[in-house]
Image (cartoon, rainbow, N blue to C red):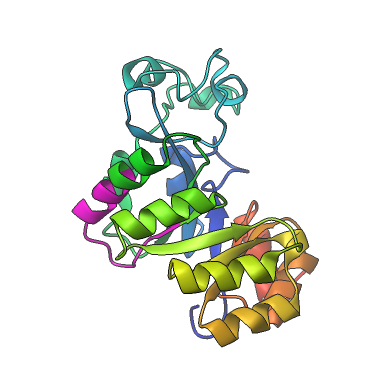
Amino acid sequence: MANGTPLILGHRGALDQAPENTMPAFERAQELAAGGFELDVRLTKDGVPVVMHDEELLRTTGASGTVGGTTLEELRALDAGSWFDPKFQDCRVPTLEEVLEHFASHHLRIVMEIKEQPGRQREAAQVIGAIITRHRFRHTPIISSSSTDLVREFYRAHPHIERALIIKTKLFSFLRTVLFANLYRIGGVHVRETALTSTLVGFCRRLGLHILMWPATTPEAVAQAVAFGVEGIIADDITMAQRARKGEG
């Protein structure tokens, strides 16, 4: 929170103004005075953490195949920007190392969603955790995941890194939150817009957990999250969320 109001974080950067999960999207989020941004992390075939939401390459690069089946060298040859606008044709899929190297010293909160990668959870926790540990941040980064296996592996490999559990539905949200708060010392929960309730927020307060809502898609959803008292709002449209946070629009 900043001055008692929730931070507005860009969802995959400023995804409405630049290709999602690319350096221009993160730089644009900073230009819009966002409190930080959220990004997605996957491992390449050769075990390098890269910033990309989909496992399939097609939507954002036009190529066939998957992130996990592609080497970093092969991935870096792909155009990750033209699908959004031809002016971004030189965009490449960034590595997590590159993003953190550029932004670690900035006044931004970085939330890293580690995507589910069956069979590679331990590898992902060890490699990603080592990269995070190498950098000095102005604000502590947060890793999040909907994979209970990944949250557990991060707790075992890098207990000093703050962890959050992603909650997508109302069903079992309380039970899962209690379980992981006690077993794996999570620091917060990141709740889908449609699953956020005032009861869940109060419940997290009693457990000492921070709570973020994602992805804010309407001014009404932002206003409700503010009223509930969440610490942060991950928004597709940063400017809309900033205005709604102030009660405008």
Q: Nearer the viewer, residue 80 or 131?
A: 131
Q: Range of the magenta residues?
A: 128-143
Q: Quadrant of residue 193?
A: bottom right
Residue 34: horizontal and vertical position, in percent? 50, 61
- Give left or right: position of 124 versus 197: left
Q: Is residue 28 above or below residue 197?
A: above
- Give left or right: position of 186 versus 248: left
Residue 2: horizontal and vertical position, in percent? 48, 79
Residue 224: horizontal and vertical position, in percent? 75, 74
Q: Is residue 13 above or below residue 235?
A: above
Residue 130: horizontal and vertical position, in percent? 24, 48
Q: Quadrant of residue 45?
A: top left
Picture mark count: 0
Image quadrant holding the C terminus, namely bottom right
Residue 11 visible in the picture:
yes
Q: Nearer the viewer, residue 182 or 56?
A: 182
Q: Is residue 212 above or below residue 157?
A: below
Q: Is residue 202 magenta?
A: no
Q: Is residue 137 magenta?
A: yes
Q: Nearer the viewer, residue 192 or 127?
A: 127
Q: Residue at x 70, y 80 (%)?
A: 228
Residue 30 visible in the picture:
no
Q: Nearer the viewer, residue 109 or 154?
A: 154
Q: Quadrant of residue 138?
A: bottom left
Q: Residue at x 57, y 32 (%)?
A: 54
Q: Is residue 94 above or below residue 213?
A: above
Q: Residue at x 49, y 56 (%)?
A: 144
